[in-house]
Image: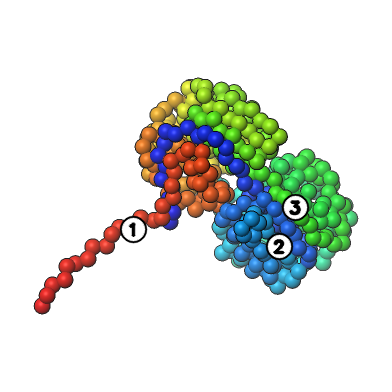
Amino acid sequence: MDKLVIRGGNPLLGTIRVSGAKNAALPAMAAALLTEEPIILENVPQVRDIETTRKLLAEMGADVELGYGRAQHRTTICCRTLVSPEASYELVKTMRASTLVLGPLVARCGRARVSLPGGCAIGARPIDLHIKGLERLGASINQEHGYVEAKAERLRGAEIVFDKITVTGTEDVLMAATLAEGDTVMHNCAREPEVADLADLLNKMGAHIEGAGTSTIHIKGVDKLHGAKHRIIPDRIEAGTFIVAGALTGGDLNVAGCEPRHLGALLQKLLEVGVRTAHTTDAVRVMGDGPLKAADMVTEEYPGFPTDMQAQYMALATQAEGTSIITENIFENRFMHAQEMVRMGANIRIEGSRAIVRGRTPLSAAAVLASDLRASASLVLAALVAEGESIIDRVYHIDRGYEHIEEKLKGVGAQIRRIGEMLPKRSVAPMVRA
């Protein structure tokens, strides 16, 4: 099992490039199930979750070609023949976004069998809102033996009101509605940029969608979708992680290839903390040359402060003067990184859905354990300012959503390297002559 070894103390200087958004690429890959024709996706990040989705689609009979060389971030998917509209537990258990195939499969094939994802480190995250939405579209759904089985001769347009905002639920039902008979109106939808990006792809495929990126989406169903070419938006969470890294290390870092419009809540909060930033149309420069001051933060659905940046903000708060109260409103179990930061010297107390962070506390190197994708990113940030050499275990979590993070950080001055599992040397008894 790989580990990251990081020696702290170096400011990050120079330019670091952002990859495509994993959370936009995954539903785009699932959308390829809606047509027999090829879908070409560009700016696809080379991360573990993309490979998991490739395996999932291939199991169903899709041809998935991942680019190499100059086209290494291009993926071509052709779902001309689907031999098995099923998503097995073995793959779904490693990545909850695998359930995004449910809507496209029942819309295209008339049936689907998808494993329930179960819980994960940051909370249960059930798919009941997906199921309710698909039932409103006319699907007959049963749950047994850990699987959701959906059937429909053809889905029918309907008015759908989500009980609570759900990103993957919005995306799943949106994809299904594109092939439903008649009109669908979805209310209380997620407004994330990744939802709008999916709708952009679907419209290129021949769908009729209006309002994506707002709380109400209108879909006029069509009989058939066709192939398309689409470029995935930049990863706003990766960009945010690097922006915080620049601020935390006192660096002068240009985060290039991002979309500043998607980072409004983060940039506003950093201004409150005392971090200077400047941006162009596709880059953010962060100048960490001033003192950091504490500021409370509350996670909210987009356009609020993203839950996927909460852990990274906590690392920043450990180095800000004063007390910051961080409230997590999206997931019920997303402070697992806090105890690992405490091992590094942070002063953090958890009270239910709140974390009380007292700064400014010097951090010191330690061996720490990553519990989920964003927790692992926060531990990397903490290690960048800790005295000594930290070892972060279970970095397969970070490989799910960050492309070559150690190479990118090394390119802007971080002392970071990846090592394989260190096995103890086996002692060999000396030979004894008879």
Question: Tag 2: residue type?
Answer: Ile
**Left or right side of 198 for 322:** left
Residue 11 pos. (x, y %): 47, 32
Identify the residue at horizontal 68%, vertical 32% (top origin): 280
Question: Tag 1: residue type?
Answer: Leu
**What residue is pinned by disc 3?**
230
Kindly report which numbered mark, 3 or 1, lies closer to the viewer in this rendering. 3
Question: Tag 3: residue type?
Answer: His
Residue 404 pos. (x, y %): 53, 49
Q: Quadrant of residue 348?
A: top left
Give the mark, 2 or 1, whose residue is nearer the N terminus: 2
217 above or below 79?
Answer: above
Where does the C terminus fall, quadrant-wise?
A: bottom left
Identify the residue at horizontal 63%, vertical 38% (top origin): 256
Estimate how packed mark 3 is, as few (under 14), some (14 to 19) or many (20 or more) residues with alpha carbons within 10 Å.
some
Give the mark, 3 or 1, whose residue is nearer the N terminus: 3
**What residue is pinned by disc 1?**
423
Give the mark, 2 or 3, whose residue is nearer the N terminus: 2
Distance Cα–Cα, label 2 vs label 1: 40 Å
Residue 182 pos. (x, y %): 89, 55
Residue 186 visible in the picture = yes
Q: What element carries label 3?
A: strand
Distance Cα–Cα, label 3 vs label 1: 45 Å
**What residue is pinned by disc 2?**
77
353 above or below 162?
Answer: above
